[in-house]
Image: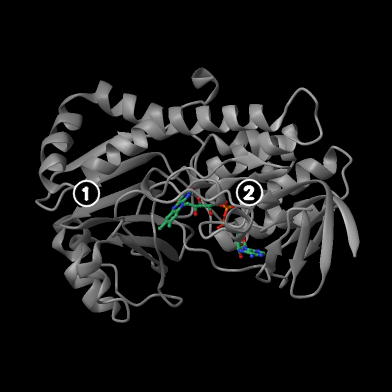
């Protein structure tokens, strides 16, 4: 059995960030990742501007900016009846394919001294902080960080899971498609009955397209033409874009799209990112939450002044403050009638548009 100070489960943005920051604090760190990178990940590919301070701190920002990407300067919301509103965004938002973004972060963790085990799934975590994988058994002397995403084995295995309340019937489909030339620097959100579609150009050739639909649309999961027809093509603004329903890679789906916060930490086990809490995706804050919770967890481990209790308090505050607008917008996005009222209102009141953008994308320090 090998011993490490810190064992990280999952090599997405949360895991790679937590591992790199722990290694930089002098800990001996192992990271176990189920896949081999680069791997595709269901995501809208939008990097929130507030991610940059964490990426700068990691020392990886320059490398990420050098990846193929597309700058974003506004968000466009389009209702099913053709109403459109533009919301300017603070500078710094970009779209980057997750396969590239995540690989850059994982490579960086390696260069910080993290021992990365790819293709190695963690199956169980014991109360003695033993981590059992398909290949062996490892022990964490100080802490385990669960960064294993929305169906976190770490949370289940250590009793940190909180049961969801109510039904969350929506499903997300995502793939890259050939980008029509007209796509500019706006991330676009097209509402339709039963859901919405988010799209953004990620580079010269590709557009990332996510369709979030209730179960009626999900019946067409293996027929992209029919899926478009029963969901986003209801929206005339989307129809006019002329995106061909031929994905450049197989369409992938995920469910559920939101959930309660799990217990953040107990007995030396810390949850970060989606393992801690799944947030409704359209405000593009998931990666930010993964980076920030990873940063807070790495600061908390082994530090007498920063206990598990302060980790719990800090991440609870982070989600409460950043998540409020997300929750409010979620209610609007799924209710066609509400969207029909709110969108013209936002168009008439630019201050409201600025307030919304600021709450979702504005600088975090003013929330502290
Ligand atoms: C449709 C959709 C669109 C989205 N769009 C955006 C967006 O535009 N911008 C944004 O910021 N966020 C977006 N999100 C959210 C974002 O994708 C997530 O919040 C983010 O990926 C969370 O990062 P993470 O590191 O916590 O988990 P993940 O990125 O899920 O990484 C978890 C890793 O753990 C590995 N793993 C899982 N189980 C095990 C195991 N047992 N052993 C070892 N490894 C394991 C997985 O292989 C995976 O690589 C979107 C989400 C959805 C569903």
Q: Is residue 33 visible?
A: no
Q: CA distance from mark 2 to mark 1?
A: 28 Å
Q: Residue at x 56, y 51 (%)?
A: 275
Estimate how packed mark 1 is, as few (under 14), some (14 to 19) or many (20 or more) residues with alpha carbons within 10 Å: many
For numbered disc 1, what is the local secondary structure?
loop
For numbered disc 2, what is the local secondary structure?
helix
Q: Quadrant of residue 236?
A: bottom left
Q: Nearer the viewer, residue 30 or 166?
A: 166
Ligand 1 quarter of the rendering: bottom right
Q: Quadrant of residue 197?
A: bottom left
Ligand 1 within 8 A of label 2's CB?
A: yes
Estimate how packed mark 2 is, as few (under 14), some (14 to 19) or many (20 or more) residues with alpha carbons within 10 Å: many
User: Which of the marked residues, 2 or 1, is nearer the chain's N terminus?
Assistant: 2
Q: Is residue 248 above or below residue 139?
A: below
Q: Which residue is mark 1?
A: 334
Taking the image as shown, residue 221 lies to the left or right of residue 22, namely: left
In the rendered image, which quarter contains the N terminus?
Answer: bottom right
Q: Residue at x 28, y 29 (%)?
A: 353
Q: Residue at x 41, y 35 (%)?
A: 323
Residue 278 position, x and y percent, is 46, 49
Taking the image as shown, residue 139 lies to the left or right of residue 240, namely: right
Q: Which residue is mark 2?
A: 14
Residue 358 position, x and y percent, is 39, 27
In the rendered image, the residue lying farthest to the front is: 127
Q: Nearer the viewer, residue 89 or 262?
A: 262
Q: Is residue 21 above or below residue 308?
A: below
Q: Residue at x 76, y 61 (%)?
A: 131
């Amino acid at each position: 059995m090998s011993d490490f100070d810190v064992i990280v489960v999952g090599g997405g943005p949360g895991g790679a960030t937590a591992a790199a920051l722990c290694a930089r604090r002098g800990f001996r760190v192992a990271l176990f990742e189920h896949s081999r990178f680069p791997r595709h990940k269901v995501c809208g590919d939008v990097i929130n501007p507030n991610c940059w301070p964490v990426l700068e701190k990691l020392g990886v920002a320059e490398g990420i900016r050098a990846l193929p990407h597309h700058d974003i300067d506004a968000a466009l919301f389009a209702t099913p009846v053709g109403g459109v509103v533009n919301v300017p965004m603070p500078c710094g938002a970009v779209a980057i394919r997750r396969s590239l973004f995540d690989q850059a972060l994982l490579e960086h963790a390696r260069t910080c001294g993290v021992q990365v085990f790819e293709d190695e799934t963690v199956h169980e975590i014991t109360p003695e902080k033993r981590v059992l994988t398909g290949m062996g058994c490892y022990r964490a002397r100080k802490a385990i960080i669960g960064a294993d995403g929305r169906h976190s084995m770490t949370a289940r295995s250590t009793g940190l899971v909180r049961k969801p309340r109510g039904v969350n019937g929506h499903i997300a489909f995502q793939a890259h498609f050939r980008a029509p030339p007209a796509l500019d620097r706006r991330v676009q959100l097209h509402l339709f009955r039963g859901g919405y579609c988010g799209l953004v150009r990620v580079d010269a050739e590709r557009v990332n397209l996510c369709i979030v639909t209730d179960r009626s649309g999900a019946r067409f999961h293996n027929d992209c033409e029919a899926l478009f027809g029963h969901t986003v093509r209801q929206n005339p603004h989307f129809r006019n874009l002329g995106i061909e329903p031929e994905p450049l890679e197989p369409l992938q789906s995920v469910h559920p799209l939101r959930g309660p916060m799990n217990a953040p930490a107990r007995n030396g086990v810390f949850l970060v990112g989606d393992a801690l809490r799944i947030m409704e995706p359209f405000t593009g804050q998931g990666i930010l939450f993964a980076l920030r919770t990873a940063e807070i967890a790495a600061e908390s481990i082994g530090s007498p002044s920063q206990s598990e209790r302060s980790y719990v308090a800090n991440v609870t505050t982070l989600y409460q403050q950043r998540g409020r607008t997300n929750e409010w917008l979620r209610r609007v996005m799924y209710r066609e009638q509400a969207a029909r009222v709110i969108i013209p209102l936002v168009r008439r009141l630019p201050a409201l548009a600025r307030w919304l953008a600021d709450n979702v994308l504005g600088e975090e320090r003013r929330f502290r």
